[in-house]
Image (cartoon, rainbow, N blue to C red):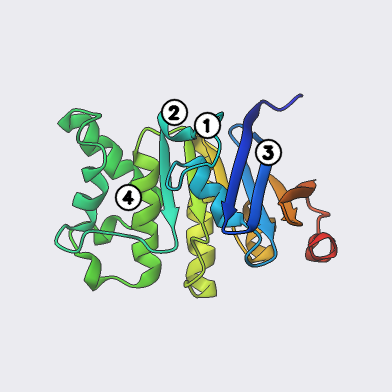
Amino acid sequence: MEEIILSIKNINKKYNSRIVYENFNIDFYLNKVNCIVGKSGCGKSTILNIISGIIPNDSNDFTSLESIGLSYIFQEDRLIDWLTVEENIKLVVKKHYNKEKIEELSQKYLDLVGIEEYKNNYPQMLSGGVRQRVNIARAFIYPSKVIIMDEPFKSIDIKNKMIIMDSLKEILKRESRTVLFVTHDMDEAIYLADYIFVLGNSPVQVMQIFENNEYLTKKELYEVI
């Protein structure tokens, strides 16, 4: 079965004399986890920031994905300290749903990421792993088509990282979302991704695309990077 493509075209970004992206095109897979890997500093986070409209593209013939509905899961959870877990999650959808629907969805995602018991707690009372699960619930409750994840597990210990990734996988079994995921960790890439894009060179190019399967190894990825 042929995969449906989300095409991103004409990415251009220059910092002083360094050309990071020049007329760069990339095709992601809809309703799949698309993981971007590459050497540190190669432009992985930059492409997410341009796609999401956080930083401008240098050419005019480009439209970010912001208009189709994006959610963000960054390394920093950016929770509001004076709101409870449940209030943080509900906050992002107050303009989208009525009160009853918000209650239903809030409970759904609290359960899916396994944090229902913490719903009345404030962020400063929580571990980093639980805070990041709140971050995930907040991203998925928002009616977005694309989830942007930039190194979301970087500061999480291995035990909590596995819990969080399993929570993500559970949600993605039930919902059709396109995920664009940047990581430096090949284990994370292999565990979560459907497709892995290796970026490299200057200006950036797609060096290789791997369709993830049980036979893909870290060694194969490192050989390209």
Q: Earlier in the sequence, mark 3 or mark 1?
A: 3
Q: Return the residue at label 1.
A: 60
Looking at the picture, does residue 123 appear above or below residue 27?
below
Callout 4 amino acid: Leu
Callout 3 amino acid: Asn
Of discs 4 and 2, which sits in the foreground?
A: 2
Q: Could you tell me how far apart the alpha carbons at marks 3 and 1 are, in whole angstroms?
A: 11 Å
Horizontal side of residue 63 vs 84, given as left or right: right
Residue 47 at x, y percent in the picture: 57, 48
Q: Could you tell me how far apart the alpha carbons at marks 4 and 3 are, in whole angstroms?
A: 42 Å
Residue 61 at x, y percent in the picture: 56, 28
Q: Residue at x 23, y 29 (%)?
A: 97
Residue 110's tag is 4
Looking at the picture, does residue 26 appear above or below residue 88?
above
Callout 1 amino acid: Asn
Q: Return the residue at label 3.
A: 23
Instruction: Please say if the residues under marks 2 and 3 sit with CB atoms less than 8 Å apart.
Output: no
Disc 3 element: strand
Crowd tier of the residue under label 3, counting other residues whose Cα lies within 10 Å: few below 14, some 14–19, many 20 or above: some
Decide if residue 131 is in sight here. yes
